[in-house]
Image (cartoon, rainbow, N blue to C red):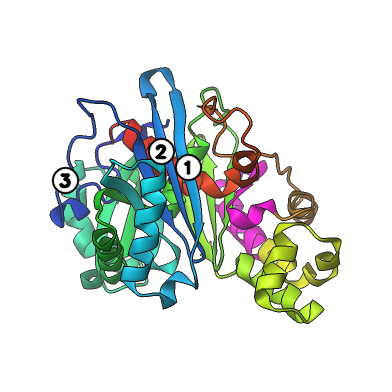
Amino acid sequence: MTQWLRQKSDVFSRTLGRFFPVSNLTFKKRRPAVGLDIGNRTIKVAALDGDPARKSYQLKGYNITALPDLAASLPESTIGEAVRKAVSEVCPQEKRVRASISGNAVVVRYIRMPQMELEELRSALRYEAGQHIPFDVKEVELDCAILRPPTNGDGKMDVMLVAAQKTACGRLLNILKAAGLSAACIDADPLATINAFTLPAGRSQEKPIALLNIGAKQSTVSILHQGIPTFTRCIEIGGEGLSLAIARGLGVELAEAERLKVFGDPLVEPHLGMVLNSIARQVRTSFDYFEGLANRAVAELYISGGSSMLTGLHKFLSQALGVPTPEWTPLEGIDTTDFPSDEQLRSVAPALDVAVGLAARSVEGS
């Protein structure tokens, strides 16, 4: 993967280490690394083993468990019990997981700062971050990574700044505690998706590409240029908006609308236009912002997340945005021979991007 993702300064690995110890993740007895993605509607778990030096990864287990209601409305104990069951089905002996913060509780910003060492940068951002994030600095955990050293003679380097609300971090830790688990590290959903995308060896990194993760309540757009992330944005539209449009249009319950959406029933197509157009407009706005700064057009869009499996979505977004939308799954470049005839795995793979990205980061020892 790109160097910025291999740095020991990976987001939150030290900042949240002040809450709990982050140990060296090289096991004396090799055990799979477990990535845990707690979404608004589902819990996703992926366990990976491998040799990062050879770009060799193997899927050892996975699980997708539906929550009884939106995660935000459920008590920590209820989510914790669901997490416990999901993780135990994948790795019964593993008690340390790699988890992440999602949605508006975490922001990723790309800024320029005078050249300095990483620890000095961390100290400086305590004073500088306030002008870049929509939170009070006292209410967030901050971390950063140096993406690029100064290149144009102005003495400034490209920096990725990540801020997560302390309340969200605390709730996640409480959920893990209720599940009988501890956090090996805490990351940010968009970075985990980027991590999953950059796993396969030989993937071209020269042209600007965009990653769109469509979750239940929100979606995230990230843009990479020359293999380095340069833009990340949360969009307040997700798969639930599509389900609501179907429910209203067909006059059915939300659960039935979700079922029709998942199974690609032709009845839903006439009712999706408004929401899909809204997603396309938001993504286009993101593209325009990046292209105005970089003077380079986004060349391709890669889509993931549970709602990315909607029938016809790739074609719609390709036509609406005027860019190719190649198919990809987070299992590209990962050995899945332990699941030779698992059709369910193939069908749900796009929803595993965050969990796979989290597990892969730990396999690499970050």
Q: Are marks 3 and 2 in contact (CB under 8 Å)?
A: no
Mark 3 or mark 2, earlier in chain: 2
**Which mark lies nearer to you, 3 or 1?**
1
- Residue 258, quarter of the rendered image: bottom right
The x, y position of residue 253, in whole percent, is 70, 79
Q: Is residue 170 left or right of residue 225?
A: left
The x, y position of residue 14, in whole percent, is 20, 48
Q: How many marks?
A: 3
Q: Residue at x 60, y 35 (%)?
A: 207
In the picture of the structure, the residue carrying the numbered disc 1 is 62
Q: Residue at x 33, y 30 (%)?
A: 364
Q: What's the residue type where badge 1 is placed? A: Tyr
In the picture of the structure, the residue carrying the numbered disc 3 is 119
Measure the C-alpha gap from mark 3 to mark 2.
32 Å
- Residue 76, quarter of the rendered image: bottom left
Q: What's the residue type where badge 2 is placed? A: Ala
In the picture of the structure, the residue carrying the numbered disc 2 is 47
Mark 2 residue element: strand
Main secondary-structure element of the magenta-colored stretch: helix
Q: Residue at x 37, y 19 (%)?
A: 53
- Residue 214, quarter of the rendered image: bottom right
Q: Which residues are magenta?
A: 282-309
Q: What's the residue type where badge 3 is placed? A: Glu
Residue 89 against residue 233 in the figure, above or below: above
